[in-house]
Image (tube, helix red, strand yellow):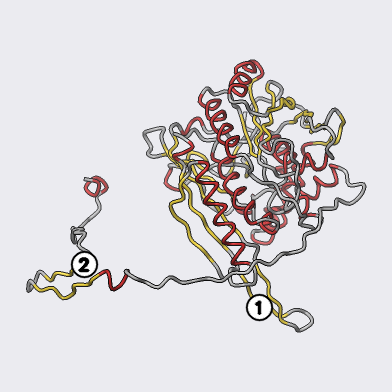
């Protein structure tokens, strides 16, 4: 019936017998050219043994240069390719093939590349569909492959939770492994990451039902001095999560919707830990660090998912964004970039360096809510016993004001910060498109109003 409905030709070519044989029947002369016993092919296959050795690397603590201000660090981080705008990619692709795309990469009145989750409608005539998200943290794997695997899952979940799903346990995922597994120590690191992935998925009740691998991620190159050296990719796991979406109209995007009329709430899944190893902050200062964020409390992630889903169902979340590459400060300014507005926030983190508070990439989420529904929002968060903070408000004035423990650490024009965020994408786009057109677009988007 499915083939008839979709007008697809089909043929019935056999049946499953369960007798352990593959039998080929020739209907022309009623002969059996092949009767293959599966035991000879699949049974008693010798197990391959891999003998792996762990190699202990030397990791130095992250040292932020003395005198580095939040503004100095932010200007560097916003220019990092993994953090900044991806306009140079979305400008050259069709983001609406089939007409069933309910949520694509660009979002908000200015169509910035901020979306956390992709949503595809099931048909043109219903509100059900599928949600898809990505999680990957390769640089943190240089410190701990186990933490990298867990964080990749955590990032995928904090991205996909902004769509209205059937249940956390209905999420399935695919794992794409890219690793130079044959080099010394790398095979053991791959094994450790795989075990950590298995364990965290079991704890979360999520199944992995597919994936692929690329295990030749190294090359021999000749350096300037004429000597050959091995260049290898950081071991990487990319988690693609997907789940049924019950209502595609309830998908939450990162762009602030009601500037001047809404508040911001921050849920810290790191529970006061502000580890910065493997972060964008470390990368822009040419370091890695020795202490990486991790997903130590999967139950807290579960409760956060459930609370966010409940808030979305009651339409109490106006916009939302996960804390990931670039840290909490990037989450906040990106929400302001997308909404073409400003924010005033004050984050409680007693005794912690503001730079670490704002640039740590522990798991977490920030969402915008209507101030007139604050009691309803707080009631749901408290019912789930979540560690949350009311950190501030949105403003119509295009200005970013951030305090940590009541002390001002950043006061900057949103437009200037957004231009920095667009800078690297702009330079890359000039290499692949007409530079005059790219220059004109860059000038226009600096302070472009949204549709009325």
Residue 21 numbered mark, or none: 2
Residue at position x 75%, y 39% in the image: 329
Q: How many marks?
A: 2
Q: CA distance from mark 2 to mark 1?
A: 46 Å
Pointer 2 local density, CA inside 10 Å: few below 14, some 14–19, many at least 20: some
Pointer 1 residue: 220
Q: Is residue 184 above or below residue 452?
A: below
Secondary structure at numbered mark 2: strand
User: Percent position (x, y) of residue 426?
Assistant: 71, 53
Pointer 1 local density, CA inside 10 Å: few below 14, some 14–19, many at least 20: few
User: Percent position (x, y) of residue 286?
Assistant: 80, 59
Return the residue nearer the eye: 37 or 96: 37
Residue at position x 53%, y 26% in the image: 310
Which is nearer the N-term, disc 2 or disc 1?
2
Return the residue nearer the eye: 127 or 384: 384
User: Percent position (x, y) of residue 312?
Assistant: 54, 27
Viewport quadrant of the C terminus: top right
């Amino acid at each position: 019936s499915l083939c008839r409905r979709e007008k697809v030709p089909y043929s019935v070519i056999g049946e499953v017998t369960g007798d352990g044989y593959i039998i080929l029947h020739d209907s022309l002369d009623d002969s059996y050219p092949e009767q293959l016993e599966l035991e000879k092919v699949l049974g008693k296959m010798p197990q391959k043994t891999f003998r792996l050795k762990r190699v202990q690397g030397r990791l130095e603590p992250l040292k932020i240069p003395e005198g580095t201000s939040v503004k100095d660090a932010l200007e560097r981080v916003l220019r990092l390719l993994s953090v900044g705008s991806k306009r140079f990619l979305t400008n050259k692709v069709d983001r609406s093939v089939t007409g069933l795309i309910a949520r694509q990469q660009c979002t908000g009145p200015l169509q910035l590349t901020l979306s956390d989750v992709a949503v595809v409608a099931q048909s043109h005539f219903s509100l059900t569909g599928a949600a898809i998200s990505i999680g990957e943290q390769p640089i943190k794997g240089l410190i701990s492959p186990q933490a990298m695997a867990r964080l990749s899952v955590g990032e995928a979940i904090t991205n996909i939770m902004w769509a209205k799903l059937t249940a956390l346990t209905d999420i399935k995922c695919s794992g794409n492994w890219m690793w130079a597994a044959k080099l010394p120590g790398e095979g053991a690191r791959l094994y450790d990451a795989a075990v950590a992935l298995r364990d965290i998925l079991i704890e979360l009740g999520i199944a992995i039902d597919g994936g692929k691998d690329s295990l030749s991620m190294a090359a021999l190159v000749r350096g300037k001095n004429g000597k050959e050296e091995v260049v290898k990719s950081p071991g990487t796991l990319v988690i693609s999560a997907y789940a049924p979406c019950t209502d595609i109209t309830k998908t939450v995007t990162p762009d602030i919707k009601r500037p001047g009329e809404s508040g911001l709430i921050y849920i810290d899944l790191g529970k006061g830990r502000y580890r910065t190893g493997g972060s964008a902050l470390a990368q822009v200062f040419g370091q890695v660090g020795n202490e990486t964020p991790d997903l130590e409390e999967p139950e807290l992630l579960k409760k956060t998912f459930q609370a966010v889903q409940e808030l979305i169902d009651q339409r109490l979340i106006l916009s939302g964004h996960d804390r990931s590459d670039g840290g909490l400060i990037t989450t906040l300014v990106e929400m302001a970039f997308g909404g073409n507005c400003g924010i005033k926030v004050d984050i409680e983190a007693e005794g912690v360096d503001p730079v670490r508070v704002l640039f740590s990439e522990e798991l977490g989420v920030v969402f915008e809510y209507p101030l007139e529904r604050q009691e309803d929002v707080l009631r749901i968060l408290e019912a789930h016993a979540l560690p949350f903070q009311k950190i501030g408000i949105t403003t119509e004035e295009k200005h970013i004001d951030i305090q940590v423990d009541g002390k001002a650490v950043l006061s900057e024009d949103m437009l200037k910060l957004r231009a920095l965020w667009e800078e690297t994408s702009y330079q890359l786009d000039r290499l692949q498109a007409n530079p005059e057109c790219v220059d004109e677009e860059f000038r226009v988007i600096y302070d472009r109003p949204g549709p009325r």
